[in-house]
Amino acid sequence: MTINELNTRYGAPGRIVFRQGHCGYPEVVLANKFGTAEIALMGANALSYKPTGHAPVIFRPAKRDFNRGESFHGGIPVCWPQFGRLAIPGMATHGFARIMPFTVRATQYSEDMTEITLGLKSSNETKSFWPYDFDLEVKISVSMKLNLKLTTKNTDDISFTFTAGFHPYFLVRDCENVTIKGLDKCKYVFADDMSEHTQDGDFKVNNAPNHVFSLKKEIKHEFAILDPGLKRALAMVSTGNDSAVVWNSGSKIRLADQEEGDWRKFICLEPVTAWPKATSTLEPGQKHELVVAIQSSIEEN
């Protein structure tokens, strides 16, 4: 659909507006009294989130344009049907959903919420990456929080296994001064060498963290990113995940779409299910939901 067609069918003046984005692919802006968010239909990536009266929550690289098939180290990429690179031999890191164009399925808004639903179905193209029939849906809304839901449905006649995750790049003043709450006493693997450890107390971010935490068996998981540089706390609540990854590229790696020093400006806290192997199995007709809510609070003077 063209931008005009998208705005005619799914837009709402001042609340839901479609426009040209990266390399000509559409983006949508969601807005209401609580804030704004920008979402790329390419990959269903939430590129920005700015609560009213707050600084931006999501980091975006200085080189903002990316073409289809290129990695984009910013926003909130969707990692599916694998997180990382260990679950499905031969598949690209973090799967193929993040490089596929999603279609708009629905939009809605009320006084307190603005929402879009995006979808991706199996096709001849997706079967060149992965042989199964599926339906993937991403629902993103702005309310007092930024809310994201990733729903995987097996539409095949046989079972399949997968991993899934959101990969938020949270904007911070200096990642090495950031503390993360919610990981105390969790076992973790340092992914660079697969060594096993147990977290003691709050997680203090240091150079190039790449930690995969096994979370306690709870219905929901609560985290906080404390950033004294920006004088704020970011709260994240997730369900449907059994792991959380803390990652930053560090000073020794220069990502292609970032400038020198950009590594200090973000920290990734990523809700993940079934890492490192694809141990989450869906029978025909079954579905899995990964849900995340993100909220910003400003430190009072």
Image: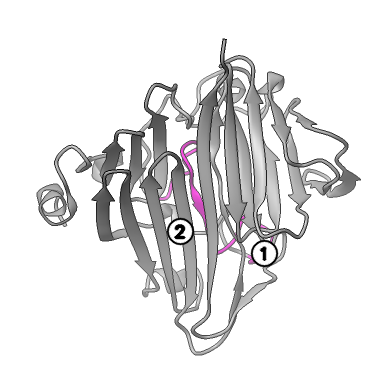
Place residue 28 in its image quadrant: top left
Compared with 240, 199 (above or below) is above
Write the residue at 49% across / 69% down.
152
Q: Which quadrant would the C terminus be assigned to in this image? A: top right
Whether residue 301 appears in this view of the structure is: yes
Q: Secondary structure at mark 2?
A: helix
> Is residue 261 or residue 288 the one in the foreground?
288
Name the residue that disc number 1 marks: 87
Residue 49: image location, x then y, percent = 41, 34
Q: Which residues are magenta?
A: 69-89
Of the numbered discs in the image, which one, if any, rests on residue 126? none
Count all numbered tags in the image, as a single digit: 2
Write the residue at 55% across / 32% down.
170
Compared with 152, 92 (above or below) is above
Q: Which quadrant would the N terminus be assigned to in this image? A: bottom left
Around disc 1, counting alpha carbons within 10 Å, would you say few (fewer than 14), some (14 to 19), or many (20 or more)? many
Is residue 206 rendered to the left or right of residue 50? right
Of the numbered discs in the image, which one, if any, rests on residue 97? 2
Badge 1 or badge 2: first in the primary sequence: 1
Residue 194: image location, x then y, percent = 83, 49
